[in-house]
Amino acid sequence: MGLRERKKEKTRLAILDAALDLFLEQGYDSTTVEQIAGAVDISPRTFFRYFTSKDSLVLWFHDHGEQIITETLRSRPPGEPPFTSMVHGLRALLGDMQESTPQDAGRFLKLRRLLDDHPHLVGLSVARGAETERRLAAAVAARRGVDPADDRMSHLVVAIAMAALRVGFECPHKDQPDLGEVLEQMEETITLVEGMLRPGWDLQDAPEPPAAPAPPASREGSDA
Amino acid sequence: MGLRERKKEKTRLAILDAALDLFLEQGYDSTTVEQIAGAVDISPRTFFRYFTSKDSLVLWFHDHGEQIITETLRSRPPGEPPFTSMVHGLRALLGDMQESTPQDAGRFLKLRRLLDDHPHLVGLSVARGAETERRLAAAVAARRGVDPADDRMSHLVVAIAMAALRVGFECPHKDQPDLGEVLEQMEETITLVEGMLRPGWDLQDAPEPPAAPAPPASREGSDA
DNA sequence: CGACTTCTGTCACACTGTGACACGAAGATG
DNA sequence: CATCTTCGTGTCACAGTGTGACAGAAGTCG
Protein backbone atom coordinates (compact mmCIF):
# COMPACT_ATOMS: atom_id res chain seq x y z
CA MET A 1 0.00 0.00 0.00
CA GLY A 2 1.46 3.35 -1.11
CA LEU A 3 2.08 6.43 0.94
CA ARG A 4 -0.85 8.12 -0.69
CA GLU A 5 -3.42 5.64 0.47
CA ARG A 6 -2.04 5.53 3.99
CA LYS A 7 -2.11 9.28 4.24
CA LYS A 8 -5.62 9.32 2.88
CA GLU A 9 -6.87 6.82 5.42
CA LYS A 10 -5.12 8.75 8.18
CA THR A 11 -6.80 11.98 7.16
CA ARG A 12 -10.13 10.24 6.93
CA LEU A 13 -9.89 8.94 10.48
CA ALA A 14 -8.59 12.29 11.73
CA ILE A 15 -11.65 14.02 10.28
CA LEU A 16 -13.92 11.42 11.80
CA ASP A 17 -12.40 11.66 15.27
CA ALA A 18 -12.32 15.43 15.27
CA ALA A 19 -15.93 15.56 14.14
CA LEU A 20 -17.16 13.08 16.74
CA ASP A 21 -15.43 14.99 19.51
CA LEU A 22 -16.80 18.32 18.32
CA PHE A 23 -20.29 16.89 17.99
CA LEU A 24 -20.23 15.49 21.51
CA GLU A 25 -18.76 18.69 22.85
CA GLN A 26 -20.98 21.36 21.32
CA GLY A 27 -23.77 19.46 19.56
CA TYR A 28 -24.25 18.30 16.01
CA ASP A 29 -26.06 21.29 14.57
CA SER A 30 -23.83 23.83 16.25
CA THR A 31 -20.76 22.28 14.67
CA THR A 32 -19.97 23.52 11.19
CA VAL A 33 -18.00 21.81 8.48
CA GLU A 34 -15.63 24.74 8.64
CA GLN A 35 -14.84 23.93 12.27
CA ILE A 36 -14.25 20.27 11.56
CA ALA A 37 -12.01 21.12 8.65
CA GLY A 38 -10.15 23.62 10.78
CA ALA A 39 -9.57 21.06 13.52
CA VAL A 40 -7.69 18.79 11.12
CA ASP A 41 -6.19 21.63 9.14
CA ILE A 42 -7.79 21.09 5.79
CA SER A 43 -10.03 23.27 3.69
CA PRO A 44 -13.80 22.81 3.88
CA ARG A 45 -13.72 21.84 0.24
CA THR A 46 -11.40 18.94 1.01
CA PHE A 47 -13.71 17.74 3.74
CA PHE A 48 -16.37 17.06 1.13
CA ARG A 49 -13.87 14.99 -0.83
CA TYR A 50 -13.56 12.60 2.12
CA PHE A 51 -17.18 12.61 3.22
CA THR A 52 -19.98 13.31 0.80
CA SER A 53 -21.87 15.21 3.47
CA LYS A 54 -21.78 16.19 7.09
CA ASP A 55 -24.42 13.54 7.71
CA SER A 56 -22.30 10.78 6.25
CA LEU A 57 -19.91 11.17 9.17
CA VAL A 58 -22.51 9.54 11.36
CA LEU A 59 -23.16 6.80 8.82
CA TRP A 60 -19.65 5.54 8.24
CA PHE A 61 -20.41 2.58 10.47
CA HIS A 62 -23.25 1.30 8.30
CA ASP A 63 -21.06 0.54 5.32
CA HIS A 64 -19.00 -1.84 7.37
CA GLY A 65 -22.02 -3.50 8.92
CA GLU A 66 -23.82 -3.99 5.66
CA GLN A 67 -20.73 -5.51 4.12
CA ILE A 68 -20.35 -8.06 6.89
CA ILE A 69 -23.97 -9.10 6.80
CA THR A 70 -23.93 -9.37 3.02
CA GLU A 71 -20.81 -11.54 3.11
CA THR A 72 -22.29 -13.77 5.78
CA LEU A 73 -25.47 -14.11 3.78
CA ARG A 74 -23.44 -15.26 0.80
CA SER A 75 -21.52 -17.80 2.83
CA ARG A 76 -24.55 -19.52 4.35
CA PRO A 77 -25.81 -22.79 2.83
CA PRO A 78 -28.46 -22.19 0.15
CA GLY A 79 -31.16 -24.30 1.76
CA GLU A 80 -31.02 -22.52 5.11
CA PRO A 81 -34.17 -20.67 6.22
CA PRO A 82 -33.65 -17.00 5.34
CA PHE A 83 -34.21 -15.60 8.80
CA THR A 84 -31.67 -18.00 10.25
CA SER A 85 -29.14 -16.74 7.70
CA MET A 86 -29.91 -13.16 8.60
CA VAL A 87 -29.43 -13.87 12.29
CA HIS A 88 -26.07 -15.41 11.51
CA GLY A 89 -25.25 -12.16 9.73
CA LEU A 90 -26.19 -10.13 12.79
CA ARG A 91 -24.08 -12.31 15.06
CA ALA A 92 -21.16 -12.09 12.65
CA LEU A 93 -21.38 -8.32 12.96
CA LEU A 94 -21.37 -8.48 16.75
CA GLY A 95 -18.41 -10.85 16.62
CA ASP A 96 -16.52 -8.50 14.35
CA MET A 97 -17.13 -5.62 16.71
CA GLN A 98 -15.89 -7.66 19.63
CA GLU A 99 -12.56 -8.08 17.86
CA SER A 100 -12.28 -4.49 16.71
CA THR A 101 -9.36 -2.26 17.65
CA PRO A 102 -9.66 -0.03 20.72
CA GLN A 103 -9.77 2.98 18.43
CA ASP A 104 -12.70 1.61 16.47
CA ALA A 105 -14.45 0.56 19.65
CA GLY A 106 -14.01 4.09 20.98
CA ARG A 107 -15.48 5.56 17.82
CA PHE A 108 -18.40 3.19 18.03
CA LEU A 109 -19.16 4.17 21.60
CA LYS A 110 -18.84 7.85 20.82
CA LEU A 111 -21.23 7.42 17.95
CA ARG A 112 -23.64 5.65 20.23
CA ARG A 113 -23.55 8.43 22.78
CA LEU A 114 -24.05 10.92 19.99
CA LEU A 115 -27.16 9.12 18.78
CA ASP A 116 -28.52 9.01 22.32
CA ASP A 117 -28.08 12.75 22.65
CA HIS A 118 -29.49 13.67 19.26
CA PRO A 119 -32.67 11.87 18.21
CA HIS A 120 -32.49 13.61 14.86
CA LEU A 121 -29.37 11.61 14.04
CA VAL A 122 -31.16 8.38 14.80
CA GLY A 123 -33.40 9.33 11.93
CA LEU A 124 -30.42 9.63 9.63
CA SER A 125 -29.13 6.31 10.78
CA VAL A 126 -32.45 4.61 10.26
CA ALA A 127 -32.77 6.18 6.83
CA ARG A 128 -29.44 4.71 5.88
CA GLY A 129 -30.61 1.41 7.30
CA ALA A 130 -33.56 1.49 4.93
CA GLU A 131 -31.23 1.41 1.95
CA THR A 132 -29.37 -1.49 3.46
CA GLU A 133 -32.67 -3.20 4.03
CA ARG A 134 -33.60 -2.93 0.37
CA ARG A 135 -30.33 -4.43 -0.78
CA LEU A 136 -30.43 -7.23 1.77
CA ALA A 137 -34.04 -7.98 0.91
CA ALA A 138 -33.00 -8.35 -2.71
CA ALA A 139 -30.21 -10.71 -1.66
CA VAL A 140 -32.57 -12.78 0.46
CA ALA A 141 -35.11 -12.92 -2.35
CA ALA A 142 -32.39 -14.12 -4.69
CA ARG A 143 -31.49 -16.87 -2.25
CA ARG A 144 -35.11 -17.95 -2.10
CA GLY A 145 -35.35 -17.83 -5.87
CA VAL A 146 -38.23 -15.38 -6.02
CA ASP A 147 -38.71 -11.98 -7.61
CA PRO A 148 -37.44 -9.32 -5.15
CA ALA A 149 -39.95 -6.72 -6.29
CA ASP A 150 -43.04 -8.71 -5.43
CA ASP A 151 -41.96 -10.64 -2.35
CA ARG A 152 -43.00 -9.21 0.97
CA MET A 153 -41.69 -12.19 2.91
CA SER A 154 -38.06 -11.51 2.02
CA HIS A 155 -38.46 -7.91 2.96
CA LEU A 156 -40.06 -8.83 6.26
CA VAL A 157 -37.26 -11.25 7.11
CA VAL A 158 -34.73 -8.46 6.73
CA ALA A 159 -36.92 -5.80 8.34
CA ILE A 160 -37.42 -7.85 11.48
CA ALA A 161 -33.76 -8.74 11.75
CA MET A 162 -32.77 -5.10 11.34
CA ALA A 163 -35.38 -4.07 13.88
CA ALA A 164 -33.76 -6.41 16.37
CA LEU A 165 -30.37 -4.87 15.73
CA ARG A 166 -31.72 -1.36 15.98
CA VAL A 167 -33.71 -1.88 19.15
CA GLY A 168 -30.78 -3.62 20.79
CA PHE A 169 -28.53 -0.75 19.83
CA GLU A 170 -30.84 2.10 20.73
CA CYS A 171 -32.23 1.34 24.14
CA PRO A 172 -29.74 2.54 26.73
CA HIS A 173 -29.96 1.22 30.25
CA LYS A 174 -26.79 3.03 31.18
CA ASP A 175 -25.32 6.38 30.38
CA GLN A 176 -21.92 5.29 29.22
CA PRO A 177 -21.80 1.54 28.75
CA ASP A 178 -18.66 -0.15 27.54
CA LEU A 179 -18.52 -2.10 24.33
CA GLY A 180 -19.17 -5.45 26.01
CA GLU A 181 -22.35 -4.20 27.61
CA VAL A 182 -23.70 -2.85 24.35
CA LEU A 183 -22.90 -6.04 22.50
CA GLU A 184 -24.47 -8.15 25.20
CA GLN A 185 -27.63 -6.09 25.05
CA MET A 186 -27.78 -6.46 21.29
CA GLU A 187 -27.29 -10.18 21.60
CA GLU A 188 -30.11 -10.39 24.12
CA THR A 189 -32.43 -8.56 21.79
CA ILE A 190 -31.61 -10.89 18.92
CA THR A 191 -32.37 -13.88 21.13
CA LEU A 192 -35.59 -12.21 22.22
CA VAL A 193 -36.72 -11.82 18.62
CA GLU A 194 -35.79 -15.39 17.79
CA GLY A 195 -38.00 -16.53 20.61
CA MET A 196 -41.01 -14.52 19.57
CA LEU A 197 -41.28 -16.01 16.09
CA ARG A 198 -43.02 -19.21 15.17
CA PRO A 199 -40.50 -21.88 14.24
CA GLY A 200 -40.44 -22.29 10.50
CA TRP A 201 -42.36 -19.09 9.76
CA ASP A 202 -39.84 -18.14 7.11
CA LEU A 203 -40.00 -21.47 5.28
CA GLN A 204 -43.29 -21.06 3.46
CA ASP A 205 -43.19 -20.22 -0.20
CA ALA A 206 -44.91 -17.34 -1.87
CA PRO A 207 -48.14 -16.92 0.09
CA GLU A 208 -51.26 -17.06 -2.03
CA PRO A 209 -53.48 -14.02 -1.76
CA PRO A 210 -56.28 -14.89 0.66
CA ALA A 211 -59.78 -14.46 -0.67
CA ALA A 212 -61.16 -13.00 2.53
CA PRO A 213 -60.23 -9.31 2.89
CA ALA A 214 -59.42 -9.26 6.60
CA PRO A 215 -59.68 -12.55 8.48
CA PRO A 216 -58.71 -11.63 12.04
CA ALA A 217 -57.00 -14.88 12.93
CA SER A 218 -57.10 -17.80 10.55
CA ARG A 219 -54.38 -20.01 11.93
CA GLU A 220 -52.75 -22.21 9.32
CA GLY A 221 -49.87 -24.59 9.79
CA SER A 222 -46.64 -23.41 8.25
CA ASP A 223 -46.17 -26.53 6.15
CA ALA A 224 -43.50 -25.86 3.58
CA MET B 1 -63.76 28.94 11.68
CA GLY B 2 -62.64 32.33 10.44
CA LEU B 3 -61.68 33.39 6.95
CA ARG B 4 -58.05 33.49 8.00
CA GLU B 5 -57.84 29.82 8.89
CA ARG B 6 -59.72 28.70 5.80
CA LYS B 7 -57.40 30.69 3.58
CA LYS B 8 -54.43 29.25 5.40
CA GLU B 9 -55.57 25.70 4.91
CA LYS B 10 -56.27 26.38 1.27
CA THR B 11 -52.79 27.76 0.72
CA ARG B 12 -51.30 24.81 2.55
CA LEU B 13 -53.00 22.31 0.28
CA ALA B 14 -52.16 24.37 -2.78
CA ILE B 15 -48.48 24.27 -1.86
CA LEU B 16 -48.67 20.55 -1.23
CA ASP B 17 -50.37 19.76 -4.52
CA ALA B 18 -48.09 22.00 -6.53
CA ALA B 19 -45.04 20.46 -4.92
CA LEU B 20 -46.16 16.88 -5.47
CA ASP B 21 -46.85 17.59 -9.13
CA LEU B 22 -43.52 19.31 -9.61
CA PHE B 23 -41.67 16.51 -7.84
CA LEU B 24 -43.31 13.85 -10.02
CA GLU B 25 -42.72 15.92 -13.11
CA GLN B 26 -39.07 16.91 -12.79
CA GLY B 27 -37.74 15.04 -9.77
CA TYR B 28 -37.40 15.97 -6.13
CA ASP B 29 -33.88 17.36 -6.13
CA SER B 30 -34.34 19.30 -9.33
CA THR B 31 -37.32 21.13 -7.88
CA THR B 32 -36.45 24.18 -5.82
CA VAL B 33 -38.47 25.85 -3.14
CA GLU B 34 -38.50 28.92 -5.32
CA GLN B 35 -40.30 26.98 -8.05
CA ILE B 36 -42.88 25.61 -5.67
CA ALA B 37 -43.48 29.04 -4.21
CA GLY B 38 -43.75 30.48 -7.69
CA ALA B 39 -46.33 27.89 -8.69
CA VAL B 40 -48.70 29.01 -5.94
CA ASP B 41 -47.67 32.65 -6.16
CA ILE B 42 -46.13 33.15 -2.77
CA SER B 43 -42.64 34.17 -1.71
CA PRO B 44 -40.10 31.46 -0.81
CA ARG B 45 -40.03 32.90 2.70
CA THR B 46 -43.73 32.23 3.07
CA PHE B 47 -43.29 28.64 1.97
CA PHE B 48 -41.18 28.02 5.06
CA ARG B 49 -43.94 29.43 7.21
CA TYR B 50 -46.24 26.65 6.00
CA PHE B 51 -43.72 23.82 5.87
CA THR B 52 -40.67 23.80 8.09
CA SER B 53 -38.60 22.32 5.30
CA LYS B 54 -38.78 21.00 1.78
CA ASP B 55 -38.54 17.50 3.24
CA SER B 56 -41.56 17.97 5.46
CA LEU B 57 -43.72 18.11 2.34
CA VAL B 58 -43.17 14.40 1.93
CA LEU B 59 -43.86 13.73 5.60
CA TRP B 60 -47.19 15.45 6.01
CA PHE B 61 -48.88 12.08 5.91
CA HIS B 62 -47.06 10.73 8.95
CA ASP B 63 -48.57 13.21 11.37
CA HIS B 64 -52.03 12.02 10.50
CA GLY B 65 -51.07 8.36 10.73
CA GLU B 66 -49.32 8.69 14.05
CA GLN B 67 -52.29 10.53 15.49
CA ILE B 68 -54.73 7.81 14.49
CA ILE B 69 -52.57 5.02 15.85
CA THR B 70 -52.00 6.89 19.11
CA GLU B 71 -55.71 7.49 19.55
CA THR B 72 -56.52 3.87 18.83
CA LEU B 73 -53.90 2.78 21.32
CA ARG B 74 -55.52 4.94 23.97
CA SER B 75 -58.96 3.55 23.23
CA ARG B 76 -58.02 -0.11 23.54
CA PRO B 77 -58.75 -2.01 26.78
CA PRO B 78 -55.83 -1.84 29.22
CA GLY B 79 -55.38 -5.59 29.56
CA GLU B 80 -55.08 -6.26 25.83
CA PRO B 81 -51.78 -7.69 24.58
CA PRO B 82 -49.75 -4.76 23.24
CA PHE B 83 -49.17 -6.13 19.77
CA THR B 84 -52.88 -6.74 19.34
CA SER B 85 -53.50 -3.10 20.25
CA MET B 86 -50.89 -1.96 17.75
CA VAL B 87 -52.46 -4.03 15.00
CA HIS B 88 -55.81 -2.46 15.78
CA GLY B 89 -54.08 0.88 15.33
CA LEU B 90 -52.75 -0.13 11.94
CA ARG B 91 -56.15 -1.31 10.80
CA ALA B 92 -57.75 1.89 12.07
CA LEU B 93 -55.34 3.79 9.85
CA LEU B 94 -56.23 1.69 6.83
CA GLY B 95 -59.90 2.19 7.60
CA ASP B 96 -59.44 5.93 7.81
CA MET B 97 -57.70 6.00 4.47
CA GLN B 98 -60.50 4.02 2.89
CA GLU B 99 -62.90 6.77 3.89
CA SER B 100 -60.69 9.66 2.87
CA THR B 101 -61.74 12.24 0.30
CA PRO B 102 -60.79 11.73 -3.34
CA GLN B 103 -58.36 14.63 -3.03
CA ASP B 104 -56.57 13.07 -0.09
CA ALA B 105 -56.53 9.70 -1.80
CA GLY B 106 -54.98 11.34 -4.84
CA ARG B 107 -52.30 12.96 -2.73
CA PHE B 108 -51.58 9.67 -1.03
CA LEU B 109 -51.13 7.88 -4.34
CA LYS B 110 -48.95 10.65 -5.70
CA LEU B 111 -46.80 10.44 -2.61
CA ARG B 112 -46.54 6.72 -3.06
CA ARG B 113 -45.40 7.05 -6.66
CA LEU B 114 -42.92 9.67 -5.56
CA LEU B 115 -41.41 7.34 -3.00
CA ASP B 116 -41.19 4.56 -5.57
CA ASP B 117 -39.29 6.84 -7.91
CA HIS B 118 -36.94 8.31 -5.30
CA PRO B 119 -35.41 5.85 -2.83
CA HIS B 120 -33.80 8.76 -1.04
CA LEU B 121 -37.22 9.95 0.04
CA VAL B 122 -38.00 6.56 1.50
CA GLY B 123 -35.12 7.25 3.83
CA LEU B 124 -36.73 10.49 4.92
CA SER B 125 -39.99 8.73 5.47
CA VAL B 126 -38.39 5.98 7.49
CA ALA B 127 -36.50 8.53 9.54
CA ARG B 128 -39.74 10.22 10.41
CA GLY B 129 -41.16 6.81 11.24
CA ALA B 130 -38.38 6.30 13.76
CA GLU B 131 -39.59 9.28 15.78
CA THR B 132 -43.10 7.92 15.67
CA GLU B 133 -41.77 4.59 16.78
CA ARG B 134 -40.13 6.10 19.84
CA ARG B 135 -43.30 7.86 20.92
CA LEU B 136 -45.47 4.82 20.32
CA ALA B 137 -43.01 2.61 22.17
CA ALA B 138 -43.27 4.94 25.15
CA ALA B 139 -47.05 4.75 24.95
CA VAL B 140 -46.96 0.96 24.80
CA ALA B 141 -44.54 0.80 27.70
CA ALA B 142 -46.85 3.02 29.71
CA ARG B 143 -49.73 0.68 28.98
CA ARG B 144 -47.67 -2.25 30.18
CA GLY B 145 -46.62 -0.33 33.26
CA VAL B 146 -42.89 -0.59 32.65
CA ASP B 147 -40.13 1.95 32.25
CA PRO B 148 -39.96 2.96 28.57
CA ALA B 149 -36.21 3.55 28.63
CA ASP B 150 -35.27 0.04 29.61
CA ASP B 151 -37.91 -2.06 27.89
CA ARG B 152 -36.96 -3.64 24.63
CA MET B 153 -40.17 -5.60 24.34
CA SER B 154 -42.34 -2.51 23.97
CA HIS B 155 -40.01 -1.14 21.37
CA LEU B 156 -40.03 -4.42 19.46
CA VAL B 157 -43.83 -4.56 19.47
CA VAL B 158 -43.94 -1.18 17.78
CA ALA B 159 -40.98 -1.83 15.50
CA ILE B 160 -42.50 -4.99 14.10
CA ALA B 161 -45.90 -3.41 13.61
CA MET B 162 -44.33 -0.47 11.81
CA ALA B 163 -42.24 -2.81 9.71
CA ALA B 164 -45.42 -4.51 8.57
CA LEU B 165 -46.94 -1.18 7.59
CA ARG B 166 -43.80 -0.09 5.79
CA VAL B 167 -43.26 -3.31 3.87
CA GLY B 168 -46.89 -3.40 2.85
CA PHE B 169 -46.66 0.17 1.64
CA GLU B 170 -43.35 -0.07 -0.15
CA CYS B 171 -43.48 -3.19 -2.27
CA PRO B 172 -45.17 -2.32 -5.53
CA HIS B 173 -46.52 -5.10 -7.68
CA LYS B 174 -48.02 -2.56 -10.02
CA ASP B 175 -46.91 0.71 -11.44
CA GLN B 176 -49.92 2.80 -10.60
CA PRO B 177 -52.23 0.93 -8.27
CA ASP B 178 -55.41 2.51 -7.02
CA LEU B 179 -56.05 3.17 -3.36
CA GLY B 180 -57.94 -0.05 -2.83
CA GLU B 181 -55.10 -2.15 -4.17
CA VAL B 182 -52.56 -0.48 -1.93
CA LEU B 183 -54.75 -0.85 1.14
CA GLU B 184 -55.41 -4.49 0.34
CA GLN B 185 -51.71 -5.15 0.02
CA MET B 186 -51.04 -3.48 3.35
CA GLU B 187 -53.77 -5.51 4.97
CA GLU B 188 -52.27 -8.71 3.58
CA THR B 189 -48.89 -7.83 4.99
CA ILE B 190 -50.33 -7.16 8.43
CA THR B 191 -52.05 -10.53 8.34
CA LEU B 192 -48.80 -12.12 7.22
CA VAL B 193 -46.96 -10.68 10.20
CA GLU B 194 -49.67 -11.74 12.61
CA GLY B 195 -49.27 -15.27 11.35
CA MET B 196 -45.52 -15.40 11.78
CA LEU B 197 -45.51 -14.58 15.46
CA ARG B 198 -45.96 -17.03 18.28
CA PRO B 199 -49.34 -16.58 19.98
CA GLY B 200 -48.86 -14.77 23.24
CA TRP B 201 -45.28 -13.66 22.53
CA ASP B 202 -46.07 -10.16 23.70
CA LEU B 203 -47.61 -11.23 26.99
CA GLN B 204 -44.48 -12.03 28.93
CA ASP B 205 -43.22 -9.53 31.45
CA ALA B 206 -39.75 -8.02 31.57
CA PRO B 207 -37.47 -10.83 30.41
CA GLU B 208 -34.68 -11.70 32.79
CA PRO B 209 -31.21 -11.39 31.34
CA PRO B 210 -30.02 -14.87 30.39
CA ALA B 211 -26.76 -15.99 31.94
CA ALA B 212 -25.44 -17.64 28.80
CA PRO B 213 -23.94 -15.08 26.41
CA ALA B 214 -25.15 -16.56 23.11
CA PRO B 215 -27.24 -19.71 23.30
CA PRO B 216 -28.11 -20.42 19.66
CA ALA B 217 -31.56 -21.85 20.34
CA SER B 218 -32.71 -22.37 23.89
CA ARG B 219 -36.42 -22.69 23.45
CA GLU B 220 -38.43 -21.59 26.46
CA GLY B 221 -42.16 -21.52 26.74
CA SER B 222 -43.66 -18.06 26.71
CA ASP B 223 -45.43 -18.51 30.02
CA ALA B 224 -46.67 -15.17 31.21
C1' DC C 1 15.37 14.96 -12.71
C1' DG C 2 11.10 15.06 -15.81
C1' DA C 3 6.50 13.47 -17.03
C1' DC C 4 2.34 11.99 -15.16
C1' DT C 5 -1.28 11.29 -11.89
C1' DT C 6 -3.75 12.49 -7.92
C1' DC C 7 -4.84 15.44 -4.20
C1' DT C 8 -5.66 20.00 -2.38
C1' DG C 9 -6.86 25.03 -1.92
C1' DT C 10 -9.13 29.02 -3.84
C1' DC C 11 -12.84 31.11 -6.03
C1' DA C 12 -17.46 31.21 -7.38
C1' DC C 13 -22.00 29.76 -7.09
C1' DA C 14 -26.89 27.51 -6.14
C1' DC C 15 -29.97 26.03 -2.63
C1' DT C 16 -32.04 25.53 2.00
C1' DG C 17 -33.42 27.66 6.08
C1' DT C 18 -33.72 31.70 9.53
C1' DG C 19 -33.94 36.38 11.76
C1' DA C 20 -35.51 41.24 11.45
C1' DC C 21 -38.40 44.67 9.85
C1' DA C 22 -42.22 47.01 7.47
C1' DC C 23 -46.53 46.80 5.05
C1' DG C 24 -51.27 45.45 4.41
C1' DA C 25 -55.29 42.79 5.24
C1' DA C 26 -58.45 40.24 8.75
C1' DG C 27 -60.86 40.73 13.07
C1' DA C 28 -62.70 43.13 17.05
C1' DT C 29 -64.53 47.51 19.11
C1' DG C 30 -66.49 52.28 19.30
C1' DC D 1 -67.53 53.68 9.03
C1' DA D 2 -63.20 54.69 11.82
C1' DT D 3 -59.80 52.74 14.58
C1' DC D 4 -56.76 49.68 16.69
C1' DT D 5 -54.74 45.28 17.24
C1' DT D 6 -53.31 41.00 15.40
C1' DC D 7 -51.55 38.16 12.11
C1' DG D 8 -49.91 36.82 7.59
C1' DT D 9 -46.81 38.19 3.99
C1' DG D 10 -42.92 40.19 1.24
C1' DT D 11 -38.29 42.09 1.22
C1' DC D 12 -33.68 42.12 2.74
C1' DA D 13 -29.81 40.07 4.76
C1' DC D 14 -27.39 36.23 6.27
C1' DA D 15 -25.33 31.46 7.85
C1' DG D 16 -24.46 26.94 6.37
C1' DT D 17 -24.21 22.92 3.14
C1' DG D 18 -22.74 21.15 -1.07
C1' DT D 19 -20.75 21.47 -6.02
C1' DG D 20 -18.15 22.81 -10.31
C1' DA D 21 -13.91 24.74 -12.36
C1' DC D 22 -9.31 25.74 -12.33
C1' DA D 23 -4.45 26.20 -10.72
C1' DG D 24 -0.89 24.63 -7.98
C1' DA D 25 1.33 21.19 -4.79
C1' DA D 26 2.47 16.58 -3.59
C1' DG D 27 3.09 11.73 -4.65
C1' DT D 28 4.39 8.14 -8.33
C1' DC D 29 7.03 6.16 -11.89
C1' DG D 30 10.36 6.15 -15.76
Image: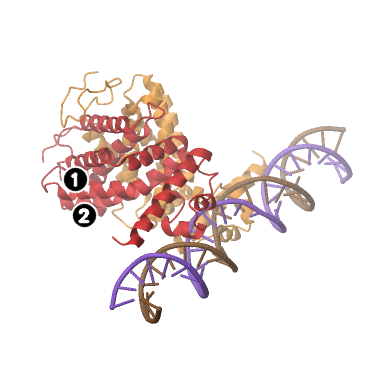
Chain colours: A red, B orange, C brown, D purple
Left or right: residue A223 versus residue B35 is: left
Q: Secondary structure at mark 1?
A: loop
Q: Nearer the viewer, mark 1 or mark 2?
A: 2
Taking depth in this image into account, of B10 and B37 the one nearest to the observer is B37
Estimate the x, y position of residue A11 in percent, counting from the top left.
Answer: 41, 54
Taking depth in this image into account, of B171 and A75 the one nearest to the observer is A75
For disc 1, the marked residue is A208
For disc 2, the marked residue is A147
Residue B197 vertical position relative to residue B203 in the rendered view, above or below: below
Could you tell me the amino acid type at mark 1?
Glu
Separation (CA) of disc 1 from disc 2: 15 Å
Estimate the x, y position of residue D24 in percent, counting from the top left.
Answer: 51, 71
Estimate the x, y position of residue B175 in percent, counting from the top left.
Answer: 33, 58
Q: Quadrant of residue A224 in the image?
A: top left
Disc 2 packing (10 Å; few <14; some 14–19; many ≥20): few
Disc 1 packing (10 Å; few <14; some 14–19; many ≥20): few
Give the total of numbered labels: 2
Left or right: residue A194 versus residue D24 is: left
Residue A50 vertical position relative to residue B203 in the rendered view, above or below: below
Q: Please state the chain letter of the residue tagged with numbered disc 1 in the rendered image.
A: A
Q: Residue at x 62, y 44 (%)?
A: B6
Q: Which mark is residue A155?
A: none
Q: Residue at x 45, y 49 (%)?
A: A55
Q: Quadrant of the N terminus of chain A?
A: bottom left
Quick check: can you spot residue B163? yes
Taking depth in this image into account, of B107 and A62 the one nearest to the observer is A62
